[in-house]
Amino acid sequence: MKPIAEIDISPESALISEHGWQSWSPSTTYSLRKRPWRPRSERNRMLCYRPETDPGDHVFWGEGLLAIDPGDGTGFHIFSATDAGDSVPSIRAEVIGSKIMVAADGRTNASIDTTAGDLDTALARWADDFAQAAGVGEMRRPPTIWCSWYNYFTQVTEDDMVENIEAIDRLELPIEAIQLDDGYQTAHGDWLTPTDRFGSIEGIANRIKAIGRRAGIWLAPFLVFPDSELAQKHPDWMVGGATAPVLAGNHWGRDLLVLDTTHPGAMEWMTDIFATMHSWGYDLFKIDFVYAAAIPGGRYDDVSPLYAYQQGIRTIRAAIGDSYLLGCGAPILSSVGLVDAMRVSPDTHFLYQPMDGDMSQPSIAAAMMTGRARAFQHGRFWVNDPDCILARPEVERRDEWAEYVGRWGGLRASSDRIESLDEWGLRTTRNLLSESPTEPFISSGGAS
């Protein structure tokens, strides 16, 4: 890494804000007495952090963005990627006595904000400029959503969907879109082939539209199961080839292949997948685990992994027209200007703390920590998705989660089985779904 700055600090009051690589990577502000969050396993590192880097907990580390409050009132130092392109530097801050030594492995912009009242405001001002340079347009209001994931996970059935569609209609809940999540497909890659738990993927869209709601669907478009029909027929469409899984045993308890977004055949196939679903009536698309397209490896075209990632997202956007596009598990800074809404934190959960203590993993505490640290992005880069409202009785500290979504949630989505909600849960869900704010949560003129 190349040294880029040396900053005098007051060690007792200085703060450092780390920005993580993708949606699930921990992001927060630390005092110098704190050790930063780091992966607790190799599986977590590959799945939720920038896989090429492993900084350890003896330095502070931002992926494309790191901010420092020296604690002496002289201003806020922000080091960042130069633009929302295909080059995102890693930025290191090492504390040595009463100085912070900053280094980076690529081109960075450095600025000092001497008038902001706090780091939030300084980051909001930085984000205003970054978004303008990236050509971000007017925020599109997201639909309020019901999602199948957090009650049924991969075992969702057509009967489950029908039950909730009917309950939403009967109770006249303010839900504008109903999203079928993971579990409808026979394999990652074979997105148009339903499991035997579904009669028809198109039929679900028709049922949703019949009650006057928009149909939404989930895909992990760049991940492929090795035993899928897609991988068997087109091994040359996979990054590095189909014989060497890029993500070994990482999720769903199995090895995963990555679709090569630079291969013309693969992109024709992807265009067809999304265009077909769009023709079936789906006009809300949640694309998940999309960081996979940016993992280093052999590709058809010799381009940077982030360029390959952006090429894949643009292909999807072209196929779905003006449908609403929600990103998740995405490299944050290289996605600015490409999606309408973005998950800005790890998954929530019915548990308050992550089971393994890793703040990249599903939990209410992890989702709140990183989502709050990225609140400055809402209304500037996109609409922030804090993850789904969970209000059923078994959710730990559900009142805290509901309060957080109400304060920091732009996109509002429920993911309980509607019939499982008690009186408090149903009332809270209805209230939270009554709005979808798009205005920035943090003013660039002062913290809100």
Image (cartoon, helix red, strand yellow):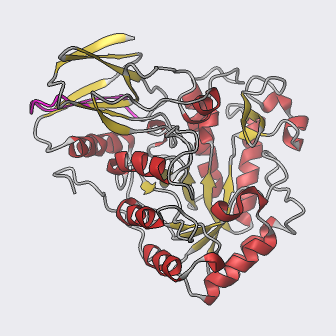
User: Where residue 195 appears, x then y in whole percent?
Assistant: 86, 59
The residue lying at 85 percent from left, 66 percent from top is 198
* Rendered location of residue 373, percent (x, y): 35, 45
Q: Quadrant of residue 296?
A: top right
Q: Is residue 110 above or below residue 442?
A: above
Q: Based on the picture, tell me whether residue 198 belongs to the magenta stretch.
A: no
Q: Quadrant of the C terminus?
A: bottom left
Q: Nearer the viewer, residue 139 or 421?
A: 421
**Residue at image coords 73%, 65%:** 279
Q: Quadrant of the N terminus?
A: top left
78 within the magenta span: yes
Whether residue 203 appears in this view of the structure is no
Q: Nearer the viewer, residue 185 or 365?
A: 365
Left or right of 82, for residue 121: left
Q: Residue at 61% across / 55% down in the picture?
A: 286
Q: Quadrant of residue 74?
A: top left
Residue 174 on image: x %, y %? 51, 80
Q: Is residue 291 above or below residue 362?
A: above
Q: Quadrant of residue 101?
A: top left
Tally of marks? 0
Q: Nearer the viewer, residue 78 or 133?
A: 78
99 above or below 431?
A: above
Query: Foreground: 43 or 169?
Result: 43
What is the residue that sits farthest to the bottom in this orientation?
170
Residue 203 position within the rendered picture, expressed as x and y whole percent measured from the top left: 80, 72
Taking the spot 72% from the left edge, 27% from the top edge, the residue there is: 246
Give left or right: position of 283 versus 386: right
Compared to 173, does 147 lie above or below?
A: above
Q: Specify whether residue 291 is in view.
A: yes
Look at the image and give the residue range highlighted in magenta.
68-83
